[in-house]
């Protein structure tokens, strides 16, 4: 057996922990601990003597709803490519491109700022190949919402982390009103937060809003995709009948979610709640892309679970719980917990390209068996990465990778990671492959996120306090354009 498959087993048998974080830093991520020293943002430019003659009046406004978001506006006198450079003296400057404003001027939103911290910013414009800028100015962000839980993040100093930002829905298990949509930086500091109970949030493809989805609507009920402006000032709702499970954004303004497809089967008096992929636009146009019924028929030997919202006479068949869209393959990926299987679906035709796992698998294992209890699936360069809630192939919840040979129809388990204490996330939980080769492993029910290298070194670990759970966690490299 390859060594990389032996590692999780050896950990379980010997009780040895995975390699600890090397002299890590506990950020105690309250975000109020962010450094407050400022200095000129180190971006090469020529400071103009008369900034008003070039930029008009430059204003920076802290959002009254999300006080870590700053909007900078100006009225350009001289046309040219423009942007804002911003940051603190201890960090590399970041940039945010300008956007047209309703008043005819320009502006941009500064994101990724920590609470109660001072930031320098400069407006910049490229004129005849030269970068001209306003004098450095300063803005201070507001305080955190006191209802936010204090996250604990340990970052390794000896293992490369991906950095970036994590979109992280947080819910208190007591069912209070303090549940939040949040974004945290690489050290676990809150940089965006909005009070809303949800299990999925995405940054919109136009980088103008956060998308949220938390409803689990039945076949005759309305679900809602919410679009929240970055400063929190506006919230739009897109109504989707029967929306449940998850959402994805396909193109700007076109979204996908899981819908229902209820049918009866000859030889049974049950109503089976099959599932579908539905696309909907901002304008409310709706089209069904795929139905599970096009790929499979239910095994009438059961057993089947009840509990379809608003439809007690129906039974669950597949319980699809995760949806991902991949632009490069123009394909949807769906995880089915009750079928112990994941699907790749051609968006253009609605055809099921393949099924991995369960009794209908199109792939044969090269060793052992193909076994998992999936709660997420995303494509990798040579296969898929799956969050296995817990199965006969694992001790606790695990991130597992399969290399797929689509020609030979074989699957090889090539990588598997569990925490050293074999935590089990009984709901939600997901795994993501990051741009630097690391994997994000989110144990939602346990309130924990690990970033792990391909050779099983822990790059960082973030924990929420007891009583808080996570939704699906999504890490991105940048917030601003």
Image (cartoon, rainbow, N blue to C red):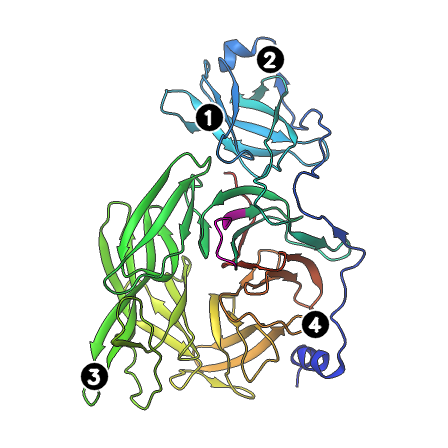
Residue 3 drawn at (x, y percent):
69, 80
Q: Earlier in the sequence, mark 4 or mark 3?
A: 3
Residue 48's tag is 2
Single out the mark in the foreground, 3 or 1. Answer: 3
Q: Nearer the viewer, mark 2 or mark 3?
A: 3
Q: Residue at x 44, y 37 (%)?
A: 232
Q: Residue at the spot x=51%, y=82% of the render?
A: 371
Separation of marks 3 and 1 at Cα, in angstroms: 58 Å
Q: Residue 386 appears at what percent x and percent y?
A: 51, 71
Labelled disc at residue 265: 3
Of the residues under marks 4 and 2, which one precedes in the sequence?
2
* Residue 436 image point, x, y percent: 62, 56
Residue 285 spot, x, y in % from top left: 22, 51
| Callout 1: SS | strand
Label 2, secondary structure: give it.
Answer: loop
Sooner in the amino-acid sequence: mark 4 or mark 1: 1
Identify the mark at residue 266; answer none if there is no mark: none
> In screen coordinates, is 48 left or right of 338?
right
């Amino acid at each position: 057996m390859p060594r990389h498959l032996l590692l999780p087993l050896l950990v379980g048998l010997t009780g040895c922990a995975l390699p600890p974080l090397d002299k890590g830093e506990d950020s105690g991520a309250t975000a109020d601990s962010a450094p407050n020293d400022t200095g000129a943002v180190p971006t090469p430019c020529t400071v103009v003597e008369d900034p008003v003659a070039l930029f008009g009046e430059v204003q920076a406004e802290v959002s009254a709803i999300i006080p870590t978001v700053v909007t900078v506006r100006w009225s350009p006198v001289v046309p040219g490519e423009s942007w804002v450079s911003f940051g603190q003296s201890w960090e590399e400057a970041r940039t945010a491109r300008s956007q047209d404003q309703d008043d005819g001027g320009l502006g941009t939103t500064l994101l990724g700022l920590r609470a109660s911290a001072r930031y320098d910013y400069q407006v910049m414009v490229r004129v005849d190949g030269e970068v001209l800028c306003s004098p450095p100015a300063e803005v201070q962000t507001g305080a955190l919402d006191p209802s936010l839980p204090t996250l604990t993040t340990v970052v390794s100093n000896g293992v490369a982390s991906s950095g970036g930002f994590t979109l992280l829905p947080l819910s208190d298990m007591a069912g209070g009103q303090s549940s939040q949509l949040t974004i945290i930086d690489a050290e676990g500091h809150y940089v965006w937060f909005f009070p809303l109970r949800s299990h999925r949030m995405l940054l919109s493809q136009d980088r103008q809003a956060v998308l949220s989805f938390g409803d689990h609507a039945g076949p005759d009920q309305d679900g809602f995709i919410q679009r929240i402006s970055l400063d929190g000032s506006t919230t739009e709702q897109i109504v989707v009948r029967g929306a449940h499970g998850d959402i994805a954004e396909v193109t700007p303004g076109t979204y996908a979610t899981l819908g229902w497809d209820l049918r009866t089967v000859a030889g049974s008096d049950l109503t089976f709640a099959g599932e579908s992929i539905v696309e909907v636009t901002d304008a409310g146009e709706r089209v069904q892309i795929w139905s599970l019924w096009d790929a499979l028929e239910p095994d009438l030997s059961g057993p089947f679970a009840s509990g379809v919202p608003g439809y007690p006479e129906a039974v669950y068949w597949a319980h699809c719980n995760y949806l991902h869209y991949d632009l490069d393959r123009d394909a949807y990926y769906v995880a089915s917990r009750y079928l112990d299987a994941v699907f790749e679906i051609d968006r253009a035709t609605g055809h099921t390209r393949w099924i991995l796992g369960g009794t209908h698998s199109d792939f044969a294992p090269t060793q052992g068996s193909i076994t998992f209890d999936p709660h997420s699936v995303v494509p990798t360069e040579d296969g898929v990465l799956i969050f296995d809630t817990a199965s006969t192939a694992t001790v606790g919840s695990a991130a597992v990778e399969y290399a797929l040979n689509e020609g030979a129809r074989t699957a090889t388990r090539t990588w598997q990671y569990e925490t050293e204490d074999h935590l089990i996330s009984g709901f939600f939980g997901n795994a993501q492959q990051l741009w630097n080769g690391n994997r994000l492993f989110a144990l939602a029910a346990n309130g924990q996120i690990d970033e792990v290298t391909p050779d099983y070194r822990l790059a960082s670990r973030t924990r929420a306090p007891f009583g808080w759970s996570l939704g699906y966690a999504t890490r991105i490299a940048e917030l601003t354009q």
